[in-house]
Image (cartoon, rainbow, N blue to C red):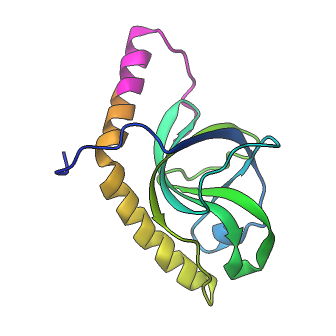
Amino acid sequence: MNGKEPNIKPLCTMEGRVVRGAGRGKKFGMPTANLALAPGTKLPQLGVYAALVFCDGIWYEGVTNVGFQPSVGGLEQITVETHILGLNRDIYGQEIRLELYYFLRDTKSFNSLREVKIQIDQDSQRVVELLADIFLMRRSDWMKFSANGTCSTEQGDK
């Protein structure tokens, strides 16, 4: 344990299909999964969150931005996009589940995508620290289900 009780219940849970974005994040080493949400989906406070992501039967940690994209001129619509830690493959068209656990910071504008990358790297470190206990519990739960046959999922490529 990291010295504090984990926030076991997520602040918000969302599910949706991963859709293509502009591809800017991928070019700078910080690809994101852009979530297509059903109309009327209730969103949390705009900002950046520590998240767990369930994709292809595997839990991952992630940094999720709920809001506009001021650094790239994306001020016309709210998006939900997650930089998924440790996932290095194309998941376009797949359904994922996002669980937001901790509000990290407000969305802010940066002067360049390089500055965005530096901030995402810092956010990623915080996510790993904040979600360590919850992540281990989720992975452990998944392994129990998988081992006893009560849940059949395909793991796909890692």
Which region of the structure is painted magenta? 141-158
Residue 62 lies, with reference to residue 140, above or below; the image says: below
Q: Where the N terminus falls, by quadrant?
A: top left
Residue 92 lies, with reference to residue 138, above or below; the image says: below
Which residue is rendered at x = 77% and y = 61% of the image? 21
Residue 133 lies, with reference to residue 103, above or below; the image says: above
Would residue 22 be counted in the magenta stretch? no
Which residue is rendered at x = 67% and y = 49% of the image? 90
| Residue 10 on image: x %, y % | 46, 41
In the picture provided, is 3 more to the left or to the right than 118?
left
Q: Which quadrant of the figure has residue 136?
A: top left
Would residue 147 be counted in the magenta stretch? yes
Front residue of 87/9: it is: 9
| Residue 36 on image: x %, y % | 77, 47
Question: Furthest-top residue in view?
Answer: 149
Front residue of 37/26: it is: 37
In the picture provided, is 122 more to the left or to the right than 40?
left
Q: Which quadrant of the figure has residue 75?
A: bottom right
In this figure, what is the number of numbered marks? Answer: 0
